[in-house]
Amino acid sequence: MDKQTHSFQAEVKQILHLVTHSLYSNKEIFLRELVSNASDACDKLRFEALDNNTLFEEQPNLEIRVSFDPEARTVTISDNGIGLSADEAIAHLGTIAKSGTREFMARLEGDQKKDANLIGQFGVGFYSGFIVADRITVESRRAGLPAEQGVRWTSEGTGDFEVETITKPGRGTDVVLHLREGEDEFLKTWRLKSVISKYSDHISLPILMRKEEWDADKAEQVLKEEWEPVNKASALWTRSKSDITQDEYDSFYKQISYDTEAPLAFTHNRVEGRSEYTQLLYIPAKAPFDLWNRDKRGGVKLYVKRVFIMDDAEALMPVYLRFVKGVIDSADLPLNVSRELLQESRDVKAIREGSTKRVLSMLEVLANSEDVSDKDKYARFWKDFGQVLKEGVGEDHANQERLVKLLRFASTHADEGVSFQDYVSRMKEGQEVIYYITGDSLAAAKNSPQLEVFRKKGIEVMLLVDRVDEWMLSHLYEFEGKSLQSVAKGSVDLGKLQDEEEKKKAEEAAEAFKPMLDKLKTALDGKAKDVRVTTRLVDSPACIVVEEGDISGHLARMLKQAGQTAPVSQPTLEVNPEHALVRKLGEISQQEGTDERFKDLALVLFDQALLAEGGSLEDPSAYVKRVNALLLA
């Protein structure tokens, strides 16, 4: 066939411009695409040769070769796969997104599809070569055709391409990229090797490059005629678990995570069904320094048929598991045409759900183990990653029940490691709710006046002191039928835990102190919405509480620290009628001419309660003056 000129279909100028300037975020991607296409071609030959062994043409060893010519300024990717006939070159290389692989798969029927599961399904990767090349030459011959029926395809990617018949002794395809000005970085062995190592290291075929050695006479690196493999050609996650040692698992983790320590735990599974994929997921032994960096992308490495696609596949792992490292290798995950962005689909959702369940199962094994070393591992995990895991309670409602069982807190019975199950198992007879308190620190929560009656009765209270706890509690209302109740909100109702004598005594005190309570309410107008007698205090004279539904003081302070405006709500002051200071205040309230002194004492009582709750005073100097005046009185 003489040289013929054909036009690309579908307004190729604009589409090629899109492919070469918009679809790919970095130029080196072109090598990944072309190597992947070469691998696909070899997989096709292997499959077709099952029915026709002569297609191997006495060359059964399939391989990919990458070479460059500094003088001609070309990079060549060669394979000895299935190759192209002249008609196929026109059809497949002349139409954007015309995938020979996809058409090949469409021809397969029935059970043959299972045998072809290694064959790629990408369409426009070939055109990525125009990112770095102003002209591409393809020389190919289909396996089984005579040498004289080779084909040369040439294009500058501007709208036309030329096709002519050539003699090509060997089957397969050579893609020759004539580099643009300024792309000389790809005319270096180390640069090509680094790209192959990054993206194509685990392709099952050997990728060969010519050896390069130092020539002392020329004082430069010189290419030899000998070829050597530059990829490992073996993906750890594709091997059987029984064939992989613990050291190999640990070494692979360190390689992909840049961590110096071995992982805390890992899971390696092959999932089959409507979506087929392999997952090798690790939990680090310690938190990375950038765990809380909002700009840092999280996610696992994504491979499709052992071809590296992206480092941080966020769509495959929920945000609250952003610390998980590892690899997910899918057999048929849909990507966009650039292979760089995941398309949200049922397959992506299935992988994300499956991977999430695997990670939670790993954590459950550690958390529920009777083995001391496993328990220690989970304690270490919780110390570093507990706050992140709490985010999942609000983000992942499908797994909320499992996540809640993994949570650990401090309580009035233990400084750490208390689960909701532990708490429920220690609940008092007749106790119907789970009591908790939030605070700025463990010390502040543990010493809060609101806990006094609970401590007196031996009732355990959860101490929630992480910044994420308040947000988490807005999504968590109960555990195993037991509702959660803040001891700092509303009036304390201990239900069956409070005897009738105590209730009667509280009612009598409220009646007896009513005149003083009214006077206190007037004195604290604008600061407290109400003043009432409390049953929650034992040793302290007063405490600050908020009503059910109002924002807690702890959350209001966090919002203020974050530069946000908190909803304005006044707290309620509860006073302990058994305390000497409150009784003294009651006596003063009945004396004539003591209104000013009573107001000062009322403000001091309120400010002290506010400080004990962890709040800050609006006017500290006024508080100091009042206290000094009382000391001198």
Image (spheres, grey):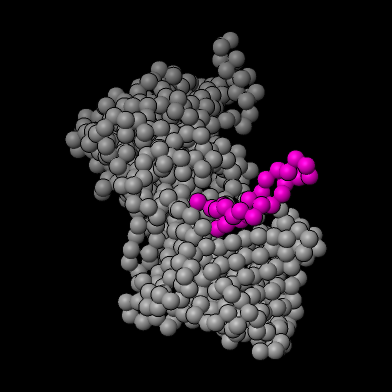
| In this view, 623 is above or below 356 | above
Q: Which residues are magenta?
A: 207-232
| In this view, 76 is above or below 483 | below
Task: Tell which of 75 and 267 is nearer to you.
Answer: 75
The picture quadrant where one finds residue 545 is top left
Task: Tell which of 367 and 439 is nearer to you.
Answer: 367
Q: Residue at x 49, y 65 (%)?
A: 62
Q: Main secondary structure of the magenta part?
A: strand
Q: Report the number of discs.
A: 0
The x and y percentages for residue 47 are 41, 73
Q: Residue at x 46, y 40 (%)?
A: 251
Q: Specify whether residue 230 is painted magenta.
A: yes
User: Which quarter of the image is occupied by the N terminus?
Assistant: bottom right
In the image, is 207 to the left or to the right of 269? right
Task: Tell which of 585 and 434 is nearer to you.
Answer: 434
The picture quadrant where one finds residue 219 is top right
Residue 325 appears in view: yes
Q: Specify whether residue 515 is painted magenta.
A: no
